[in-house]
Image: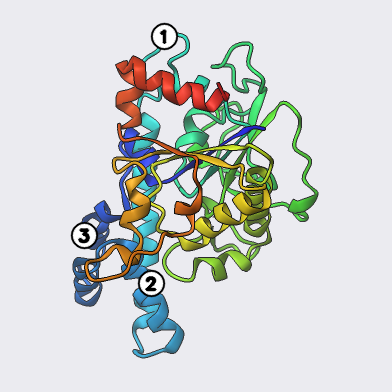
Amino acid sequence: MGAALLTGAGFSFNWGGRLAKEVNTSIAMRVQNDPYLTDLLHRSPNFEEALTELQNACAISIRPATAEQLGKLESAIVDLFAEMNKHLADATFSFHNEGGWTIPEFLALFDAIFTLNQDLLLEKHYLIPPPIGLSLVSGGRWDLGVLPGMDEMPNPAVTAGRPYDALLAQRRPSGSPRNTLIGSRHQPYYKLHGSMNWQDPNGGHLLVMGGNKPTTMQRHPILMWYADKFVEMLSRPNTRLMVIGYGFRDNHINQLIHDAWLKGGQTLSMFIVHPDGREILRKINPTSRPGNIYFPGLLEQIPAIYDSTRQLSSTFRSDTAEHEILVRYARGL
């Protein structure tokens, strides 16, 4: 019995992060000299759908300029996330500094943290490197948080003696990530879709965006291992999964949760922190549209689902009752 945390874009939103549908304008402004890309972004609900359309077009080479435009769009997305990371780095991490209310104290309650985000919010504010460790959580169970199987690359641009800056760090997978040993006092942080500052062995960005995410993940052993660790953790009997800010639009992630629920004897419970609460599972169900016969989706089959429809920033600023509910669930009380 343990507790895991899964975060999506709505988690970083509490510190000024952008949701997928919110970044279109910023990206469009970066590619405004390309009318096709500008139009594509304006008619797409979010940048990932625009990226998917270009990825698919590039795969079948329907236009000579497609590959170049895909490169432009990907570069604009990376630039946008770099800018967003700077704003996240400047944000105040805890909304209330009284003991028992800080965000690091809350995060430290989980046996493992999984995320679909590629920003550096936690690297900057929570995964403080040695020798400091998680000193913000005095007397806690963790000495530090780790990104299992990822090695930090030497950076000659960083002057010796300069304070560590997570925004300057670049990482790449170790040679054999599955052989990584995670210390008993090391809290693992698994970025299921990679990160903006990760490189693949060829020097490209190691991140998963747009369509065909499962196929992209299969090309990276580190991400396949992370997915296995996700199922392994959730398959333990009576595991509690808190999900913050995820809209359940990644079918491959939903499938992993459902598989773990079955594998663990259907004892997994889930606590959804989202403006729509549990109703988000019904909203994303394609059979919920008018005129259809409704069939419950995979995750709707899980009976033990709880929710909070309030923003994390509000709950951890002054909402005593809601704060207690989240902390009690994380603790298993």
Q: Nearer the viewer, mark 1 or mark 3?
A: 1
Pick whichever of labels 1 and 2 is earlier in the sequence.
2
Mark 1 lies on residue: 98
Which residue lies under the disc numbered 3? Answer: 29
* Residue at 39% from the left image edge and 47% from the top image edge: 82
Q: Residue at x 36, y 15 (%)?
A: 96
User: Is 244 left, or right, of 166 in this rendering?
Assistant: left
Q: Nearer the viewer, residue 147 or 227?
A: 227
What residue lies at 48% left-to-right and 22% top-to-bottom?
327
Could you tell me residue 6's position as x and y percent? Answer: 50, 42
Q: Position of residue 41 (x, y in %)?
A: 24, 67
Image quarter in which the C terminus is found: top right
Please tell me in which quadrant of the rendered image residue 21 appears.
bottom left
Q: Which residue is mark 2?
A: 52
- Residue 59 is at least partly visible in this image: yes
The residue carrying pointer 2 sits among few (fewer than 14), some (14 to 19) or many (20 or more) residues within 10 Å by Cα, namely some
